[in-house]
Amino acid sequence: MSYIQSHLKEGCWFTLGDSITERGWYQPIVTKNLGLKEWKNYGIGGTCIAQKDKNDNSAICLRYEKMGSNPDIITIWGGVNDFGFDFGSYGGLEIGDYKDKTPLTFIGGMKLLITGVTKKYPLARIGFIITTPISVQRGMNSKNAKGYYLSDYCNVCREICEKHSIPYLDLLKQSGFNEGNIDIMTSNSLGTVSDGLHPSKIGMTRLAPKISNFILSI
């Protein structure tokens, strides 16, 4: 199947996120599928959408300001470290409420991120990727130290995107990852063992067509 469309061919794609993006495993496949000229990796491992504390300058809701210029496409993939059961924020970040304007809560960070990116890049095709399921051992069905489930953070992502008319790809619900295959769909950075968190190369090969089709729809 050919994914190449005239409006995307030779385009530039910015990928913003955490270690899932930093690994750079899905971008080459999608770039080839869509006939893009280049992709730029703005993923940093362990980072959250919101600030972990007031001294955290790595938050995704702040880092977008340092991205380059003139992207044709921007995708943002984050949120799992904000849940941070035993990783990322190690205990979770406060979700907050919809009045928040602070980067120190998840809602506040999401609002700042989405409004900031859409204003900085008014002509770019922008989409959000809701993160994949994680293993039960990594907290899939458990509350973090703040009392929230991963699904609570994903619900915020959906709501904020919908409020700002930003399309999203819901990989929590549509990736095909589950406890029965999480051992092959996730791996450490070497690809040697499952880590229950990061999509493996097999997992990314499964996800790449979904991401390609999503980008075409933006």
Image: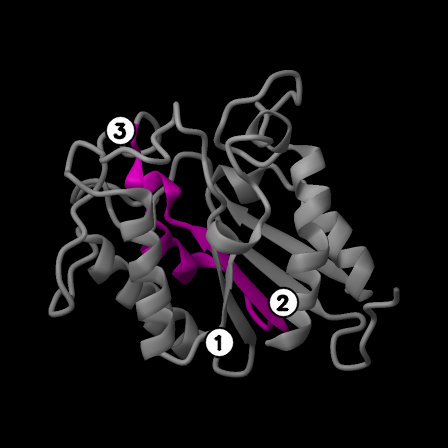
Mark before the other along the chain sequence, 2 or 3: 3
Q: Secondary structure at mark 2?
A: helix
Q: Residues within 10 Å of mark 3 (few under 14, many from 20)?
A: some
Image quarter for residue 204? top right
Which kind of residue does numbered mark 2 sit on? Phe
Q: Secondary structure at mark 3?
A: loop
Task: Tell me residue 170's x, y (percent).
Answer: 49, 59
**Pair 3/1: label in front:** 3
Question: Farthest residue toward the front?
Answer: 180
Say if the magenta span includes residue 63: yes
**Residue hosting label 1:** 121
Name the residue located 49 percent from the left edge and 73 percent from the top edge.
167
Residue at position x 61%, y 69% in the image: 73
Picture coordinates of residue 32, whole percent (x, y): 82, 56
The tag on residue 90 is 3
**Amino acid of disc 3:** Tyr
User: Is residue 18 positioned above or below 30 on the image?
Assistant: above
Magenta segment range? 59-85
Where's residue 203, x and y in %?
A: 65, 38
- The x and y percentages for residue 119 are 39, 78
Q: Which residue is mark 2?
A: 214
